[in-house]
Amino acid sequence: MLPLVKPYIGPRDEMMPAIEKILYSGYIAEGETVYKFEEEFGQFIGNSNVLAVQSGTAALHIALLLLNIGPGDEVISTPMTAEPTNTTIAITGAKIVWADVDPDTGLLDPQAVRKKISEKTKAIMLVHYAGMVCNMNEFNKISEETGIPVIEDTAHALGSKYKGKMLGSNSRFTCYSFQAIKQMTTIDGGAIAFGNPDDLVPARKLRWFGLDKRVSRLENDITRAGYKYGMNNVTAAIGSVQLAHSQEILDKYISNGKFYDEALKGIPGVTLIPYYANTEPSYWLYTMKVEDRAAFIKRMEESGILASSLHHRSDTHSVFASSKCDLPNMDEWYSKFVHIPCGWWVDEETRGKIVEAIKKGW
Ligand SMILES: *Cc1c(COP(=O)(O)O)cnc(C)c1O
C-alpha cells in the first residue's frame, strides 16, 4: 500500500559518519552541534532568531509560557490539527476557544476568529494544516489591530511560503516539529523562530530549567523555573544532514502537489482547495474534498493507495469538553476532506496512476 507519510532519512554515507563523530566525541549533550544546526536552520527559513528544542510540542509550550498564558486566559485555536496544538494550550491552564474554519480550506476563518476575541484572549494559535497556509493577510491585520500575538504551528508547513518567503518570520512565534513523519525529521525535535529577538534569552532559559546555558553556571540565577526541552548534539548532527537535503525533498512534495492541483481539476466528486492570496503550500499531505469519502477511500485502497483523513478533530476530546461550541463549517469540512499520497516517495509514474484511479470514479 502506498503510504501517506514516510520518513526521509539522508544518505547513509553522510548520516552514519555524522552520527558516529558526535556519539564518540565525548560531548553528546546540547553544545556546538546544536548551535550550528540552529544557525543552518535559521538560514534555511530566513530568520536567524531560532532555538532548537526537543519537539514541536516543547516549541509550542515555550511560546505559550513566554506570553505568560495560564488559568483565566483564553487562546483562540482550531480543532483541525494534530492533538499537541491544543493539549499544549490545555496544560497551561488557559481555556481553548474554538473558532470555526473556512469550509473551503479547513483553515481558521479570520472572521470567525474576530468574533471570538474577548478581553481574556492572550493569543491566536494558527495551524498551517497539511502545509496549506492560513489567510495571513487577514490574520496579520487582526494581530496589528488588536495587539494579540499569533503563534504559528508550522509542524506541517516547513517550506510553505507567505509573500514569497518561507514561514518563520511573520509572527511573534513560529513553531516547527521534526518528529518522525514531518517533512524534515530529526527522529524527534523541533524549533522556535522568533519575530521579536527579545524573546530569545527567556526562551533559552525556559528550555533548560531556567538556566542560561551560554552563561557560566555560577553566574546563573534562576528567576523562573524552566523545563528540560533542549535538543542534544546527536539529534542536531542528524538535523544538519537532514537539512542539507530538505530543499530537494520539499521540492518533490511541492512538484507532486502542483501536479495534482492541475490534474485533478474538473473531476466529478472532487473539490480542490483554493489557496489564499500570497500563500504557497508545501503539500505535506495533499488535501482535497470528496463526495462519499468512505467509498473513495475504499476504492483507493483497492488500487493500493492509502487515502485517509488522518487527523481527528480536537474539539471532540473529553478533555476539551468545556470549550464545546457549534462549528458548522468545521462539520461540513470534516465530513469531506481527505488526503492522498504526495511526498518524496511518490514518483511521476505513481502520481499519474493515482490520478487515473481517481478519474475512474468510486
Ligand atoms: C507533530 C505536530 C505537533 C507536535 O510536534 P512533536 O514534534 O511531535 O511534539 C504539533 N502540531 C502539529 C499540527 C503536529 O502535526
Image: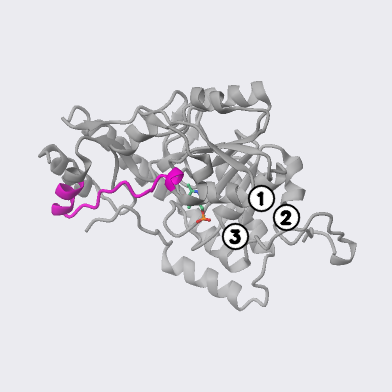
Residue 91: image tag: none
Q: Secondary structure at mark 3?
A: loop
Residue 206: image tag: 2
Disc 3 marks which residue?
Answer: 54
Q: Counting residues from the N terminus, which is met first, the one under dot 1 or under dot 2?
A: 1
Q: Tell me if the residue at label 2 has its CB under 8 Å from ligand 1.
A: no
Spatial separation of the CA atoms under disc 3 and disc 2: 12 Å
* Residues rendered magenta in the picture: 297-316
As displayed, is residue 5 above or below residue 121? below
Disc 1 marks which residue?
Answer: 62
Q: Is residue 125 visible?
A: no
Give the residue at x 21% y 49%.
350
Q: Tell me if the residue at label 3 has its CB under 8 Å from ligand 1.
A: yes
Quarter placement of the C terminus: top left
Give the residue at x 58% y 62%.
236
314 falls in the magenta region: yes
